[in-house]
Image (cartoon, coloured by chain):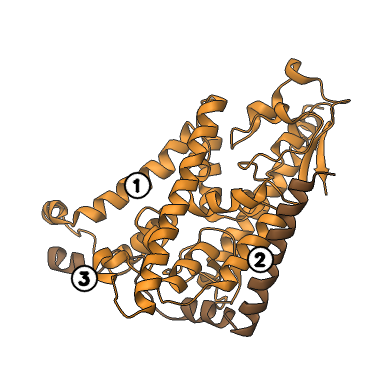
Amino acid sequence: MNYRKWSIRAILLILSIISIVYAVKYKQWEYAKEILTRFIDYENGGLPKALLKVVI
Amino acid sequence: MPIINTLKSILKYRITILRTIVQIISFILIFGGIFGIAATFIILPIMTPAGNPYTTVIGAWQLMEIMLTAAIFPFIAIAIILVASLTVGRMFCAWVCPFGFISDVVSYIGKRRRVPRDINNSLYKFALFVAAFLLFIDFSIAYNEAVGTSIYSYFGEFAREPSSFIEPTTILFSMLFWYFYWGLYPKSLEALEKLIDYPPFFWFRIFVLILAIGINYFIPRWWCRWVCPLGGAMSVGSRYKFLKVYVDPKQCIGERCGECNKVCPMGVAVLDFRGREISHPLCTSCMMCLDVCPTNAIRLKI
C-alpha cells in the first residue's frame, strides 16, 4: 500500500467535497450560467473601443 | 483484399478514431449556440472562451478567474478541477478541449520532432509557474476588491481574466470573433495602412495565437504541455488519478518496439513506466499508446 499516494488522494478528496458543498450552498452554477448568457468583454482586449479610433 | 487490409489498418487505431469523433462532437456542442443550443450551467475542466456568444459551456479556469476577480471564492471551479484531476486526470485535455483538438489537427499534418525527455519534463514546470503566477494575480485582485482598494486599473482590459492575455482560445474565439463580427478589419487596400496604428497588445495576442497553433506542426500539443495554466494546475492532482494507463511488463517487449514512446503527443516516455501505472503529470489518457502497442501490453486500470 502506497501511503503517500493514498494520503494525497484523501486530502484532494476532502478538498473536493468541501468545495462541492460550498458550491451547492451558494448555488454557484447560476453564476456560470449568468456569465454565458450575458455579453462580457473581458477577453476582447479592449475591442471595439481600442480599434474604433483606428479603423473608423 | 486491399480494401479489407486498409480497413484493418484503420481499425487498428480505433481508440484514436473514437477520440477524434468525441473531439469533433465536443467542439460542435461547445459552440452549439450556432445551432441554437442554449447556454448551460455546465463547467468543464477545459479552456473555453466565455466571451464568445455561441459557447454553451464554460471552462473551469475562466470561471475561476472571473469569479476571483469579482471577489467571489470560486468553490465550483475548484471542485471541478479537483474532481477531474482525481478521477480522470487530464483526460478532458485530450478528449474535449477545443484548443487540444486544433493542436491535434495541426500536429496530424505536421512533421513531428521529438523533444528530449529531460527538456520536456523541465519545460512542463513552466506551466506550473504560469498557473501559480496567474493565481497570484487573481488572488491579489480578489483581495483588493474584497477590502475595497480595487487594482483593476493596473491590469487594464485584462483585469477580469488575466490569463486571456496569452490564452489562445480566448484570442481565437473571442477577440478575433468579435473583430470580424463587428467588421473592424480593413475593408479596402488603403485601409491596410491603419493596421500599423493597432494597439500593440492586439498584435502581441495575434503573435501568441500564431505561435500557439503553428508550433504544433513540429511539437504536438506544446502549448498544452508547457504553458496551459489549467493543464499545469490539473497535472498536480492527476499524478494521483484513479483511472490510469498501465504497462504490463510481461507482455511489453520494451526498447525493441518503443512505439508508445514515439506516438505519445505529450512526449511522455511510456516505457519508463513498465510494470506500473503511468503517473506522469503530462499524461492526458489520450490512449494512443494503447492503439499502437503490438502486444496489447498497455491497458486502462482503475
Q: Is B40 left, or right, of B68 in this rendering? A: right
Instruction: Tell me which residue sits at (70%, 31%) in the image.
Output: B270
Residue matched to label 3: A49
Q: Chain of mark 1?
A: B
Q: Chain of mark 3?
A: A
Residue B215 spot, x, y in % from top left? 43, 36
Q: Is B58 left, or right, of A2 in this rendering? A: left
Going by the numbered disc 2, the residue's amino acid type is: Leu
Kindly indicate whether the residues beneath marks 2 and 3 are on one polypeptide chain: yes
Mark 1 element type? helix
Would residue B43 be seen by someone viewing this image from the given angle? yes
Residue matched to label 1: B208
Could you tell me how far apart the alpha carbons at marks 1 and 3 are, in whole angstroms?
21 Å
Mark 2 element type? helix
The chain drawn in orange is B
Q: Earlier in the sequence, mark 2 or mark 3?
A: 2
Q: Which label lies toward us, 1 or 2?
A: 2
Residue B33 spot, x, y in % from top left? 52, 72
Write down the colour of chain A: brown
Residue B8 spot, x, y in % from top left? 80, 33
